[in-house]
Amino acid sequence: MRLIVVDTVARTMDGDENSTKDMNVFVQQLDQLKAKHNCAILLVHHTGHAEKGRARGSMALKGALDAEFRVSKGQDGIIRFQCTKMKEAESAAPMAFKLKDVYLGADDDEGNPIQKAAIEYVDFTESIQPSSTGLGNNQKLAIDALNDLMDEKRDELESKGNDIENARVTVNEWRTRLLDNGLDKSRFHEIKNSLNKKCLIMIEGSYVRACSQTVF
């Protein structure tokens, strides 16, 4: 069996991933490849930070899939592999893994052991996510702005062929976006501290990120 891997959808399709028309053209091109090479096609695609329950872009893509799986990493460090669509069979059971360091049997020039990450199977449990219920309008505005900024950073990296996992948002960028969206500048530190206390954001030096599930 031949396999073509498309990594990622956004980097390889010609058009707007949010356009149903453009996505249908992309699917037709994939069908032509499949027929020509008698192969299976594996698509790597991303969710948005604000909509982690589904893939980014037009739903026309999901409609054309035979199967869809979501890979996510929770705050507990567990990597979860879950079937979100199976066209002509029962859905596969979810699986879970964690990364562990494996010694490669050699040391570097400074005598430190050389290690690489490997995945280890663990029992599957549902991920527990921070709750955003009970947030005020400004707190919701702040979370939405942070998620939007992260999406923009990821898209920028992806368009240049770089790893989207390097996407980071500075606290100053977040503050500027909120002020541009009409937030009173005297409220920023109060909102930042309250979200941090609720464990809905994490401050890492000069950077900030939302404490939500990472989906690949």
Image (tube, helix red, strand yellow):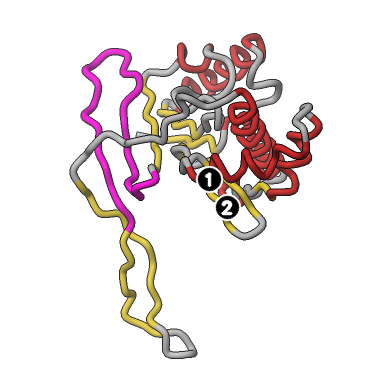
Give the structural element (helix, strand or loop) at label 1.
Answer: helix
Image quarter (top left, top right, bottom left or bottom right) of the N terminus: top left
**Which span of residues is magenta-colored?**
75-99
Residue 3, percent across and down?
42, 35
Task: Name the amino acid type tagged 1.
Answer: Asn
Above-or-below relation of 151 to 102? above
The residue tagged 2 is 203
Q: Give 192 or 118, whichever is nearer the viewer.
A: 192
Q: Disc 2, disc 1: CB below 8 Å? A: yes
Left of 178 or right of it: where is 199? left
Q: Give 193 or 75, whichever is nearer the viewer.
A: 193
The residue tagged 1 is 196
**Which quadrant of the figure has residue 192?**
top right
Res. 216 visible in picture: no
Residue 38, percent across and down?
42, 26
Disc nearest the viewer among 2 and 1 = 1
Q: Which mark is residue 129?
A: none
Left of 193 or right of it: where is 127? left
**Residue 97 on the magenta segment:** yes
Give the structural element (helix, strand or loop) at label 2.
Answer: strand
Residue 133, percent across and down?
45, 24
Which residue is found at the position 25% from the left and 54% from the top? 120
How many numbered circles are shown?
A: 2
